[in-house]
Amino acid sequence: MDSKSVKLDEFITEYRFWGEWEVSYTDGTHLPEDEYVKLGKIIIDASKETAQNYPILPFLFLPTTDQEVECRFSELIELLFELSKEQEKANQPDATKKQKERVNALNRQADTLKKQAKKVIGDQLADSMVRTGLLRPEFWLMEEQIIKMEFLEVMRKLSKHVYLTFVVDTSALRRATISFLHKTLSEVPIWTVVPVFVMTEIQRQAHELKKIWFSNKSKTDLKNCKVLGMRPQVSVISRELNHIRQWRPLEMLTTLPEHLGQFNGISKIDRLIIESMKNLKRERGLHQGVYLITGDKDMASLATLENQGSLHIGVPDHIPSKISSVNYDSHNEKLVLTPVHYLLWDLAQVFSTIRLKNKELCRTYELAYYSEASGGFFANDVMEIQEG
Amino acid sequence: MKIEVINSEKQEIIETYSVSNLPMFEFQEWQVLNEVVIDLDQLSVAIAKLDSKDPETNEPISNLQEVDFYLPDPIKNRVLSQLAKSQMDTEGSEDQIHNEVAERVSMPKLKSNTILSAVATEILQNHQPHSDYKVRISDG
């Protein structure tokens, strides 16, 4: 199969999708070669002719269920752990206590792994759907001891400001909050401020990811499925920063070099971000329209306690079994359509290699973002596509 | 179509949603009605049951609808420019072709029940469950 490197806009204009597609992923850090895990199904109710005229068509996304992930990981665990062989030995009448204990330990390990995989895949699918507009994020606006939770109320309150300054942490960038707010509050100028501590955190995660990638070349370890939670901290955040930078003001709020070496641990980074926000307001005489955006409820509450406005962004608890790509934006009274390409792009940035399979059309695509070739270039938003 | 969320006890309108190009008669159950009132907590169930098929062709009713693409603006603009470039062999100035392409791709055919479901999902996300809340649907 020939591979081609494309950017997101090229992917949308050059590749047309119609019919039913199964989406699955593989990842060299924790899955054996040629083993795929299903992520969901995409249904595009259109003909080839319609797809030629309308490159962006409505679709339905049916995300994989927890049970499906658990079953698949049971198969993979058997494949890698040789659990069934050990179980057979332990069931023999002459089995030793040691053999039985080993099977119990393996079963416990397998259960932990299945739970870990189920959680990380579910969380990442939900985050992907929020980032690509399939699911609307939940907002809590906390200001002057008042919490507003209704979307329209929050948007109306924010849109009353002449301009808005958003100080973001890594979770806000990871959930592509600024892109969402630029779209929804298009009438208000938005200034995005990224404290340097956020960038150091991204740098740390990039280093960790690289370590896992290179240390894992010789053997597959399912425990490494934790990379699915780490990867968006690098790939998705870089994409979000690149997008903002291209058309809206983005400021990296730096600090004295001696302060950079003085932190370790998440809570200290949170404190430094809140302090950066206070300094920014003090130094520039900003009194209104400055908000900390975070996906961390505790951090948002803490900032509010210290008289700083904050906006908590959350992912809906309940993920429907069928999600439509057509949504209604009640703040702007318009219909919004997510391109299927955008969802696939995002999934590949999180899950490394995505396989799309249409049995009826006998067509397969493989989208690789974090392959060995592009692993080090997360700031360059390019995908490798293979058609089969 | 106009969809109002009302507090039936206080007789007050909480929020009004208007959806252009979606008349009530596109749904067979509502064809002869001027107004429909549904409990807010029954909205998604009621909408899921609606039949929006053309009685003659038995095909779902679809309309060309203007949509905004959920893409960052620079990407959206590049997509439209590239699509326009691929049509450059057709007659007309560059700007004219660009506008025509942008207009065409931003007006896909959407099924009536897909649109109404999208609005219902938004309404349910915007209002906390409340026993006194009802939804009044009319052509407004």
Image (tube, coloured by chain):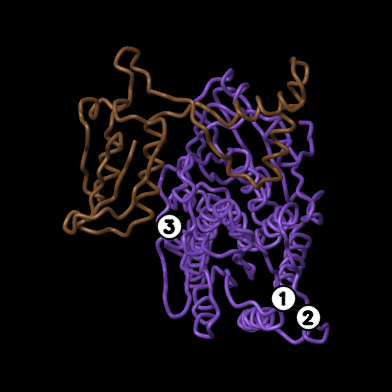
Asked whether A9 or A123 is in front, the reply is A9
Of residues B52 and A218, the one nearer the viewer is: B52
Residue situated furthest front in the rendering: A162
In this rendering, the label closer to the viewer, 3 or 1: 3
Quickly name the residue at label 2: A255
Q: Circles 1 and 2: CB distance less than 8 Å?
A: yes
Q: Give the distance between the C-alpha atoms of the residues marked 1 and 2, in whole angstroms.
A: 9 Å
Look at the image and tell me in which quarter the C terminus of chain B lies: top left
Task: Please state the total of marks drawn on the protein image.
Answer: 3
Say which amino acid is labelled 2. Answer: Thr
The reply to whether dot 3 and dot 1 touch (C-beta < 8 Å) is no
Residue A197, labelled with which disc? 1
Badges 3 and 2, same chain:
yes
Q: Residues within 10 Å of mark 1 (few under 14, many from 20)?
A: many
A383 over A313 or under it: above or below: above
Residue holding disc 3: A152
Place of residue A70 in the rendered image (x, y in percent of width and height, measured from the top left) = 47, 53
Query: At which x and y percent is residue A75?
Result: 52, 49
The purple one among the chains is: A
Q: Earlier in the sequence, mark 1 or mark 2?
A: 1
Kindly identify the residue that appears in the image at 21 percent across and 38 percent down: B36
Query: On the rendered structure, is A150 left or right of A26?
Result: left
Question: Mark 3 — on which chain does it sit?
Answer: A
